[in-house]
Image (cartoon, rainbow, N blue to C red):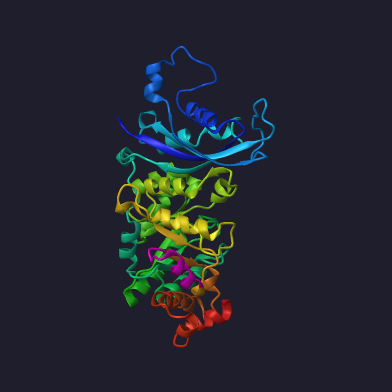
């Protein structure tokens, strides 16, 4: 079958960039450390990875990673560059696990490299033979929440852990009655003995359905069903049984294959949390960038994907968040495979103007924990203040001016601003 998988890497090496690229290409396709009798020219022509381009960057006097080999005569000069390598689709087939073994496998251990990072990935459409992509995505999420013309606004249940199902019920009642668009479990709150997921789902959905009967709006709740695969599917059944329309999964806990398996069974939205992402990406000279990661998550079927927020509490820069949002909104194979970027971390009503000015899109999910729960007049007022912040941003009205006639925003500015 025709087609190539193109991986783009940032590399650092004490050798020439061309030599290092050839080592990567060989290691991840037909090569080994010695010539083999069965490694015919015909086999290599059909199955060997090929170098598409090598772009030199700066040099450095120190290796980014330990254990790298230095050729004779090199007195401590390490070259950096961007390398594109094409892997034959025939080597892999439509399989994300085997794709990862090829483009992000043992090459990180190669002694010719003192730094390596997968920064992009281009996939042929044959992967759609096995993977379904988002079931709902941006359009479907808007239809389920009834939110148009602004971001989907939501919150995380706080405190993260410790609430009984009855305590959760009261919080959900207030939020759903206030008309909040979206609620999610915290990623550390799964199926603990003190508050089993089945009891939490029942309590939360009773309140959501009751509020929907009164207001005409059904809040979307992303229940955290992260677990071993068989148990995760049982949790999914529980959510569906009680009328839920969204589940949350910690992608790096269950793996991309676990996410794809969930997509095959889930009739509801899948809210993707990327916790543990920092250990894969925080060191800039190792690991993976968000661009290839989000493509794999989207292909496997996620509908919403966390990207951090502007001016967040974590290490990630605003430039990185902006690029992550744009990646999620850029089609891979067609318009229907874009996903809703989820902005969180230090979010509140006052963040809306900068967020809109910077990102220039409302195709976002903007969620806040403390920015809603810590509002002096309660969580319902916290949600309304967030909506008012976005209304001001979309109108181009100064927050202080808009707060003159919007009390919840006024109180949020006094409390957080």
> Is residue 359 one of those drawn in magenta?
yes
Does residue 195 appear anywhere in the picture?
A: no
Q: Position of residue 410 (x, y in %)?
A: 51, 83
**Please, which residue is most extreme toward the right here?**
75
> Is residue 353 one of those drawn in magenta?
yes
Relative to residue 363, is residue 213 depicted above or below?
Answer: below
Task: Give the camera-side residue of 373 and 302.
Answer: 302
Main SS of residues in magenta? helix
Residue at x 41%, y 50% (from the top left corner): 234
Quarter occupied by the C terminus: bottom right
The reply, left or right, for residue 354 in relation to residue 70 is left
Task: Give the camera-side residue of 133 and 53.
Answer: 53
**Please, which residue is most extreme toward the top here?**
37
Relative to residue 270, is residue 26 depicted above or below?
Answer: above
Quarter residue 69 falls in: top right
Q: How many marks?
A: 0
Task: Give the camera-side residue of 342 and 250.
Answer: 342
Relative to residue 114, is residue 212 depicted above or below?
Answer: below
The magenta stretch is 351-364
Q: Position of residue 397 (x, y in %)?
A: 43, 80
Q: Position of residue 20 (x, y in %)?
A: 54, 31
Q: Position of residue 329 (x, y in %)?
A: 38, 56
Quarter residue 17 falls in: top right
Residue at x 37%, y 74% (from the top left corner): 211
Does residue 295 appear anywhere in the picture?
A: yes
Quarter occupied by the N terminus: top left
């Amino acid at each position: 079958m025709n087609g190539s998988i193109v991986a783009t890497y940032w590399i650092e090496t004490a050798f020439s960039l061309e030599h290092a690229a050839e080592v990567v290409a060989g290691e991840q396709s037909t090569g080994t450390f010695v010539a083999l009798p069965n490694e015919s020219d015909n086999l290599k022509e059909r199955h060997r990875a090929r170098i598409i381009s090598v772009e030199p960057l700066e040099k450095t006097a120190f290796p980014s990673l330990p254990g790298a080999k230095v050729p004779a005569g090199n007195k401590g000069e390490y070259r950096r560059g961007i390398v594109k390598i094409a892997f034959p689709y025939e080597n892999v087939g439509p399989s994300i696990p085997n794709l990862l073994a090829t483009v992000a496998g043992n090459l990180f251990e190669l002694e010719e490299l003192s730094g390596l990072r997968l920064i992009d990935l281009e996939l042929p459409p044959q992967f759609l033979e096995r993977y379904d992509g988002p079931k709902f995505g941006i359009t479907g999420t808007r239809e389920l929440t009834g939110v148009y013309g602004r971001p989907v606004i939501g919150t995380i249940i706080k405190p993260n852990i410790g609430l009984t199902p009855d305590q959760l019920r009261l919080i959900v009642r207030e939020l759903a009655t206030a008309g909040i668009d979206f609620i999610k479990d915290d990623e550390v709150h799964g199926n603990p003995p003190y508050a089993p997921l089945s009891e939490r789902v029942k309590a939360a959905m009773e309140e959501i359905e009751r509020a929907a009967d009164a207001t005409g709006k059904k809040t979307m709740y992303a229940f955290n069903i992260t677990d071993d695969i068989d148990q995760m599917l049982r949790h999914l059944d529980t959510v569906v049984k009680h009328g839920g329309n969204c589940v949350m999964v910690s992608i790096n806990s269950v793996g991309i294959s676990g996410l794809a398996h969930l997509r095959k069974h889930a009739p509801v939205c899948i809210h993707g949390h990327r916790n543990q992402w920092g250990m894969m990406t925080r060191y800039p000279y190792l690991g993976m960038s968000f661009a290839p990661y989000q493509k794999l998550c989207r292909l496997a079927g996620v509908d919403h994907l966390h990207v951090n927020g502007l001016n967040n509490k974590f290490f990630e820069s605003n430039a990185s968040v902006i690029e992550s949002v744009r990646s999620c909104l850029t089609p891979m194979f067609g318009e229907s495979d874009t996903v809703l970027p989820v902005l969180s971390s230090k979010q509140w009503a006052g963040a809306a103007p900068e967020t809109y000015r910077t990102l220039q899109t409302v195709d976002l999910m903007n969620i806040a924990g403390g920015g809603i729960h810590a509002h002096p007049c309660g969580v319902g007022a916290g949600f309304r203040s967030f909506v008012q912040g976005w209304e001001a941003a979309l109108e181009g009205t100064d927050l202080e001016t808009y707060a003159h006639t919007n009390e919840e925003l006024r109180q949020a500015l006094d409390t957080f601003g």
